[in-house]
Amino acid sequence: MPVPKAELHLHIEGTLEPELAFALAERNGVELPYRDTEELRAAYRFGDLQSFLDLYYRLMAVLRTAEDFTELADAYLARAAAQGVRHAEIFFDPQAHLARGVSMGTVVEGLAAALDRGEERHGVSTRLIMCFLRDESAESALRTLEEAKPYLHRITGVGLDSAEVGNPPAKFREVYEAAAALGLRRVAHAGEEGPAEYVREALDVLGVERVDHGLRSMEDPELVERLVRERVPLTLCPLSNVRLRAVDTLADHPLPAMLAAGLMVTVNSDDPAYFGGYAGDNFDAVRAELGLGAEQLRLLARNSFEASFLEDDEERRAR
Ligand code: ES4
Ligand code: ZN
């Protein structure tokens, strides 16, 4: 049995496997610029974050109805459960759907229909985290938060994703203040392609309690010291970092150095349909390529529950 773990960095749109993409395309009468799943998979050669995002946003065209989102999330939960995931905090990108004429209600209610059955069908508890696209304007993010107001009982927190460089956290100060005032938890992608300074800004300006990736924090020893002192969780995604060329090979990943520095790190899958693996595959890969021992793998699993937004009693049940 795979070790029980929580998945804290997972974009639901990034779980769209080629087979489901083609099935939904056919059902919805959407033309995909690929002949078959093989040709689509062959397009997964990414030079950097932007080349991935271009394909990621393009393929979303197949997601039209609430049922599409339900099927997507249910398929994810089945795969996650098979790899030992007991709890998943799931990102979604409403702006990418609103821009295509798919409403907030379609997305949230579609996802929620699967998540509501997650424990019973798959033994996986869940939370939803709504992400703002950082390459869109702050005004667009504020409008999105406004649109989400009827659905806030379903949404635990807000996040920040998409193209990082040139879109620093401070651009979203106001929307994060508004989110906090609504009682939403706050996380943000920072230090994936962007500098360590963006990690500091996410903490100081946006008040995030968890940093997604945070890989480049290692370039700033003072920041590392602070992250250790404050026990700020960093949700690492090793296979994503290899595919998007944040590291040359998995063997070069700073995860062992981050553990040695005493950082509160977790291992996650990001966009598993695109990057070659779900949470368990990421655990297997770091064990094989980075030589992590049983004790370190147990620590990573323990961190994943501790860094989650579960309450203590829920956390004990999930572990
Ligand atoms: C993402 Cl890997 C990654 N980075 C930033 N934004 C994203 N959205 C989906 N996957
Ligand atoms: Zn991500």
Image (tube, rainbow, N blue to C red):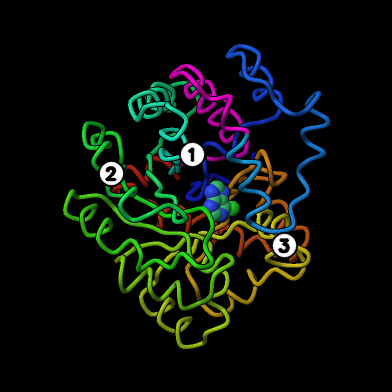
Number of residues whose C-alpha sits closer than 10 Å to that of mark 3, classed few (under 14), some (14–19) or many (20 or more): some
Q: Secondary structure at mark 3?
A: loop
Instruction: Return the x and y of residue 280 as percentages of the image width and height.
Output: 64, 45
Q: Residue at x 30, y 39 (%)?
A: 155
Outermost residue toward the left in this view: 181
Tag in front: 2 or 1:
2
Region rendered in magenta = 59-88
Give the amino acid type for the residue marked by disc 3 in the picture. Arg
Q: Secondary structure at mark 2?
A: helix
Task: Work out which quarter of the rendered image holds the N terminus and state it.
Answer: top right
- Relative to 225, residue 281 above or below: above
Question: Front-most of 291 and 97?
Answer: 97
Quick one: label 1 or label 3, which is nearer the N terminus?
1
Tag in front: 1 or 3:
3
In which quadrant of the rendered view does residue 261 lie?
Answer: bottom right
- Relative to 69, residue 175 above or below: below
Tag in front: 2 or 3:
2
Number of residues whose C-alpha sits closer than 10 Å to that of mark 1, classed few (under 14), some (14–19) or many (20 or more): many
Outermost residue toward the bottom in this view: 222
Query: Can you tell which mark lies on residue 68?
Result: none
Query: Can you tell which mark lies on residue 143?
Result: 2
Name the residue beneath numbered marker 3. Answer: 245
